[in-house]
Image: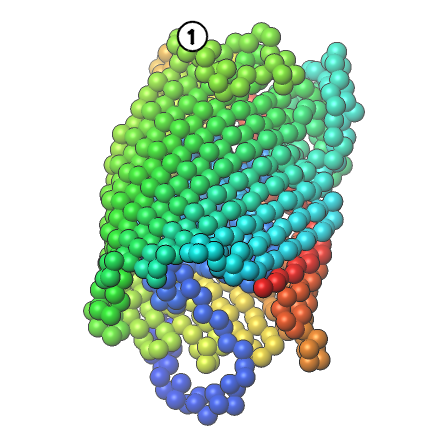
Amino acid sequence: MPNPLGNSALGGGLRLLSTAVFAASLLPTQVVAQDAASAQQSDQRVIEEVIVSVRYREESLQSVPSAVTAFDTNALENVVAMDFQDLSRPTPNVNIQQVNQFPNAAAVHIRGIGDQRIESTEEPRAGISIDGLFFTRPGSSNIDFFDIASVQILRGPTGVNFGKNSLAGGMAVQTIQPSGELSGKVDVNIGNYGREEYRFAVDSPKIADWAFRLSYLYKQYDGHFRNRFDGTPKGAFGTPLPFTLPVDKKLGAEDVSSGRLQALWTPSEKIDLRLIYNWSRDKSDPTPGDTDSDDGSDPRFPIQLACAIAFGCPEPDDGPYRLGRDYYSRSDIDQDAFTGILNWDFGGVALTAIAGYIETDDVFLNDFDQTEFFFFPTSRDQTHDQSSLEVRFTNSDDSGPLDWVVGAFYMEQEHELTQNFPTLGPSADYATQEATSQALFGQVIYAINDRLNLTAGLRYTEEEKDFYRDPGIFLPDLTYDPATHLTYSEARKLARQDLTGDIVSDLNTDHVDYKLALDYQLGDNAMVYGQVATGFKAGEFGARASSPQTALPTDDEEALSFEIGLKSEWWDNRLRLNLAAFWANYENLQFGVFVPSANLTGQETLNQNVGEATTAGLELDLSVSLTERFTLNFNAGYLDAEYDEFCADLNGARPYDSPPTSPCGRVTDLGDGTFLVDEDQSDLELSRAPEYNYHISGEYDLPLPENWGGFVALLSYSYSDEYFSDGAFNHPKGETGGFGTWDGSVAWTSSSGALRASVWGKNLSDEEEISGLTPTANFFNQRFWFPPRTYGVNLSYSFE
């Protein structure tokens, strides 16, 4: 393992924080010197306190000895945050985008570590929870931010507090709970490209000991892509095929309805029970892209079939939002989630129990090759169920120096997937996995004295997974017509009829995570801290692999992180300055890559441990109320991320005249005369890990006559350095970043606060930039784009 003290970024961070600590040590005399001025400035705006709960208790953000960014309802509204992607820009060293063609899935990277895969067997590296219910799959994780009380983003490994799959960090969402008073809100958002969004939430008055809340969302969007396809599919070399397909001229549409029904029972001050039912019905298009396939001019990337069958690469140069989609573009995603939260204070000891169940069924039809050649149309049908229970006991008497929590966690989940390939074979495949996870955990926060506090935590986790896959089901009657495609239940029956070539495997693993932190109060307004924390992600199976050797399972990923920081408030709470410096090491990193294969489809996704990486960096969060009307926010991150070891096969199986050798790792004999040969790839860069990023925003309250309400203008600029977006390959066509975007809004609120009207815009300079690239074996490269300039008008009315 590399030495954290030898890293230049961390050394620079130590010098930076030493300077900050010295300045903070002057705080008491500065406060005395400002007493007279404070009396004159009492009417100045202060930076509002932010409450978080990342340590199993509600406390000020400034008291938490770790790097956390939090957004409450007002902050989400001011930045026009529609989902997790909108919180990426104002959070240092965080990159959140959708998983390319899957708009409802969030690809989260924190401090250079993350994931952009979609299969349920490939769980994310950043934990996501909603009202304490943990989401284990990337699909359906990019939720809409209506009726949300807060979003907390914890940067760095957090295995003790968030549990499994949190070696990069964690994101906790809390929804608004019933108030017990008759009140509500109606919200309408209208924008360009046919955007229409309607939301409402209503609270019932308390009925006996019960309170209820219902919230609902419907949104539609025509999409900003236009289809040039004329309806006649073409085969190899442009030969027309003997059928036509109905096509949509507008692509990238959204069609989502979702809701949340809650009941809150409070029979006494000591007991409350909250019941939540969430549902979502999503019929949006898979996000369209175009193709930028390889023509063989770069020796690293041989010519791909999409270019070979077209006598040249087929994508016309007619702009990023005009493309050729020659197959259906549909999705149908149904998700139902049930959560029950019980809090019971026994006097001195309090119980919290969180039980949850999530059921997700989704169907995708998509033109995965992104060309006007009828080459790789695909459909996917899958289901995923999970149920979980977490029980915690905490001390409810905070009069002493010790706060503690102990608890247990249990989860089980089941997943089934089939994919249909009408032009490859024609064939289908099938995969299923059953998994359980259970954990015991505890944490103590001990006040050593009035200034020094110790936080210590421990979590023990056991995981089991049972995996089955049939990589090739030959289906001569499979056609372009979705009516001929298999559902997952039909594929399950066919797969079990012949087990030849099928993959059956299991995984049993356990892990201990820990956290140790010290924080020291320099005064009433400043604190310095240091912590060490770990995280892990269990080994996993490849849901699109073709053999036991490529499905594996992989080894567990492990993370070890050191962090030091400063939390401070100055200038009579008109300036908040938070700094962090970190160093982290990640072992047994797991990645999946598309490679050529001898199976029916001609390609597969290798799932493998590629090696070890180290990340180090600095983060700054600054908010300052310069006047009673103007507030400035500045957030910046520096990241030094690199592979220490990267030994893997990125090219796929190849034949050799004699058994080959590897310069750094394994040679895998697939038994058909071909071998996977690990090669040294340590000169590659981590995906979605820009060296630096920053976000600056200004908020100004415009003066209006008395009783005319309030007028607020917000303008922000975000910049990210260059980075690769294509996963492991570092394909030059997947390099993006190196540009900035402007966002802004102007909002009027009535003097009563009931009525609000705003005009908003995103990507105001209309940057046309790549958001992601998916190299797909020797077939094609799928290329995706950030949205163009979007704008709209929002109206909301609140009543009580």
Residue 70 in view, yes or no: yes
- Residue 42's x, y, as percent? 51, 85
The residue positioned 69% from the left and 21% from the top of the image is 373
- Residue 61 is drawn in which quadrant? bottom left
The residue positioned 38% from the left and 76% from the top of the image is 525
With 713 as the anchor, is 269 left or right in this view?
left
Considering only vertical position in the picture, is 166 above or below 314?
Answer: below
Residue 148 in view, yes or no: no
What residue sits right under mark 1 in the picture? Answer: 497
Considering only vertical position in the picture, is 614 above or below 330?
Answer: below
Q: In the rendered structure, which amino acid carries the disc numbered 1? A: Gln
Residue sitting nearer the eye, 277 or 475: 277
The residue positioned 72% from the left and 40% from the top of the image is 222
- Residue 5's x, y, as percent? 30, 57
With 301 as the anchor, is 661 left or right in this view?
left
Considering only vertical position in the picture, is 778 above or below 59?
Answer: above
Q: Secondary structure at mark 1?
A: helix
Considering only vertical position in the picture, is 288 above or below 445?
Answer: above
Could you classify mark 1 by the number of other residues whose Cα lies within 10 Å: few (under 14), some (14-19), or many (20 or more)? few
The residue positioned 52% from the left and 9% from the top of the image is 474
* Residue furthest front in the image: 208
- Residue 308's x, y, as percent? 65, 20
With 771 as the anchor, is 691 left or right in this view?
left
